[in-house]
Image (tube, grey):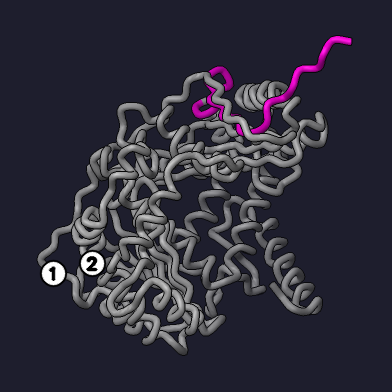
Amino acid sequence: MSRAYVRIFSTIAVALVAVQRLNSTSSSDNAISGTTKTFIQNENGQVIKAKQLKTNRRTRLFFVKNDNAPLIHVMINFKNSGPAHLERIKAGIPYLYEHIFCCGCGKYSKSQILKALKDISCDMTCNVTQDSLSFSVTIPKIVMQEALFLIYCIINEPRFEENAVKNIQLSLPGPGRSMENLMHFAIHTIIPSLIFRSHTYENGIYGRDEDFINLTIDDMRKYRNKYLTAANAEVCICGNLTENEAIQLVNQIFASTNKNVEKTNDIVADVVPKIKPDVKHYYVNGTLSTVIFVQKGVLKKSSKRYAAMLLYHIIGAPGVFKSRILSTLRTQLGLIYRGNVCSRSLVHADLYLGMLQTDNSNVERVMNAVKNILKQIKTGSITKSDLDFAKRNMKGKILINMRTTASICNFFYDAMIHNLGENALEDFIKGINSVTLDDIHMVARELLDEENMLFVVIGGKCKKKKNS
């Protein structure tokens, strides 16, 4: 965030000019035209693209040069290393690894490695999806070599201090009692178990509690040796460095990796979520409830993905008051405080989750209203004006979101892991522009099903009023 109002207004002014340019671009435009430079253009006025480079450790590298700040963003994805690729009793290993990756490494104890990262302002996180485990690192360029040594230790020489690991392990499984924990549990455990039955996505991100609690440090070591290798890795780097520096950076991280270790194969099949009508209640004391609902999406590799994106943008784009969710449920009916629909894109499945906050007494009305919205849209209520607004808004959002090195890296990282290619940003703009109203109506009929909806309700139980 800016520290001065002048910088805030300046940023907003530049963004508005850029959005205006996007808004005026017709569907036949090649990409973005005009002379005003935008956040998604490079110094030559071309739409930013990645460059795929080769390292000497068989590691695929997506590289985007960006000199806007003296920072380097590195995202490392270990393919086929998520819970969906493990046997059921070991499904929780990646989720536990995510939380213990800094529990000692090399010569450093847990507290020492955390202090060492903090001392050079290096931020490192670990994240797990059902498909893979990944690391995200932000490095000030001035301390790149010091940071690389620490990253090397964390990835290649984990010690897994026993007491620290056990304390974390005991605190993780299960939904807990808070709204936040229950929402996490619903999204990553309850919903997958219901819509992916008989598929490996069914296990969610940490499997069963009774299996999770029995995982050992030896399990962690075996997992690291098999899955967290250069052969399995794919890396996206964006920042103030050269192509050669980016290649050397990856080579240093995997310098000690055994070249004879083979990559793991993708053993997971594509799957379409099977959604049956159901309502699951999880009670938390209080006057508010969060209502989560599920609808089908299309895989990122599908030609219909842009129509699906725009469809759900119209239904419930976060922060867009013209979306059907907010304009109907909040503005017209006064049933919710906030609500949106967000994508959950897995490698082999795609779905959209709606999240609505309401009073406990309005839960039933909210669920019925959502069904009605989807029914209306499925029967053709989306207009050309709705579609044009969604296109402008979606392109404007991606443009503004791409104003930092970190957001550029995130975009191309997602493109990398879904094999969308080096021109993913330009393809996105062209793809959004190309969607027609007929495309929207067709994909709405294909994806939306108000008769078969899964709802998960998290919140306080509404007390019935006594008869006077």
Chief SS of the magenta region = loop
* 16 to 171, vertically: above or below: below
Q: Position of residue 231 (x, y in %)?
A: 21, 63
Q: Give the quarter of the image for residue 63.
A: bottom left
Q: Is residue 18 visible?
A: yes
Q: Position of residue 170 (x, y in %)?
A: 40, 49
| Left/right of residue 78 with respect to residue 336 in the rendered view | left
- Say which residue appears at 52% left-offset and 69% top-offset: 406
For the view shown, which residue lies furthest in the bottom direction?
A: 142
The residue tagged 1 is: 259
Whether 460 is among the magenta residues is yes
Of residues 143 and 309, the one drawn nearer to the viewer in this rendering: 143
For the view shown, which residue lies furthest in the left direction?
A: 260
* 56 to 321, vertically: above or below: below
First in residue order: circle 1 vs circle 2: 2
* 413 to 219, vertically: above or below: below
